[in-house]
Image (cartoon, rainbow, N blue to C red):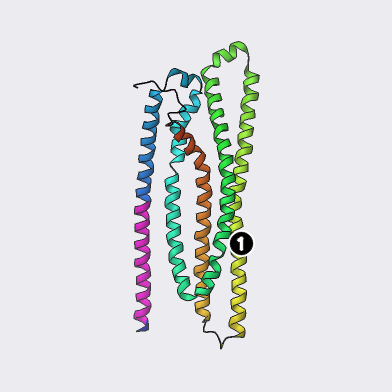
Amino acid sequence: HIMYLFFGVILCMLIAVTIKSTLLYASELLMSKVSRDAEHLLRAKIFNRYLLFSKAYFDQRKLGALSDLAISQVMYSCRIFEFIHSIAHYLFMMTMYLMVMLYFSWKLTMATCVLIPCIYSIVGFISKKINRSSQRKFEIDQAIDANLYDVLTNMSLIRAYTTEKKERIQYEALSEESRSNLHSIMKKMLFVPHIQEVILTYAIGLLVAVCTFIYLHNQRSYSLDFAIFATFFIFLRRFSGSLMAVGSRITEIARLTSIIGQILNIFDDREECIIKNG
């Protein structure tokens, strides 16, 4: 009977992993299709929007920046669907782990959940800073693309007026500002998973120490079995890994919000020069 039980557990694990992988692949495939469809729809809508604008609109803006917004930035901004899918996946896994942890020990689980507001207050604070930095990064990149486009399309005039040195200095200054800004963004993004891991590790270490002390000194008074205790912390570690992944995806979305805002501005009739009746 023990052998049948053992092989039955192994079979259930294999079936569960197969079902999970199949469903995850199907959801990723669906999200990829949604992202590609959104890219196509946005590119078409932006192009149709450009056709409605008057000549004054294009005179006030760099053509390179408009081209980059309609192609590269649309592709990048549509990654938000991948991040949302990833967050939903990790939240589902966190729910499953949390249910198992509650089954083993609701007191330890409640103690662990106290950390979640602390972690996400830190993530939210850093995400706001990333959003502001990303807005500036977007403007710098647009200026770089526009400058490069203008230089390449007017190379004959640059050679005629011998302004190569001026253009070189201007381009290098923009590139340096972009480098500095991106480095600032990456410092914040890389900081998030590490601070989460430090907080969770300290908390898990404290819980382990307290529970071990209780188990060793009050073994007769507490029915907490050591095997159950160890299993709880295995699931707690998996829960913390999913929690850190959600925090990382939130910071990624914070980078995208500024780009999405710029794309949405294209469809704001109050700020654009639109030709009446198309």
- As helix, strand or loop, the secondary structure at mark 1 comes to helix
Q: Say whether residue 100 is left or right of residue 16.
A: right
Write the start and end of the magenta stretch as one range: 3-27
Horizontal side of 80 relative to 143 (left or right) equals: left
Residue 52 lies within the magenta run = no
- Residue 132 vs residue 77, the one in the foreground: 132
The part of the image, by quadrant, that contains residue 130 is top right
Q: Is residue 2 above or below residue 273?
A: below
Which quadrant: the C terminus? top left
Query: Does residue 270 lie above or below 227 as drawn?
Result: above
The number of numbered badges drawn on the structure is: 1
Q: Residue pushed farthest front?
A: 270
State the residue at coordinates (45%, 74%): 103
In which quadrant of the rendered image does the N terminus lie?
Answer: bottom left
Residue at 61% x, 31% y: name it: 175
Residue that numbered label 1 is attached to: 199
Q: Residue at x 37, y 61 (%)?
A: 20
Q: Position of residue 9 (x, y in %)?
A: 37, 74
Residue at the far bottom in the pictured view:
220
Horizontal arrangement in the rendering, residue 150 relative to residue 278 (left or right): right
Indicate whether 230 appears above or below 137: below
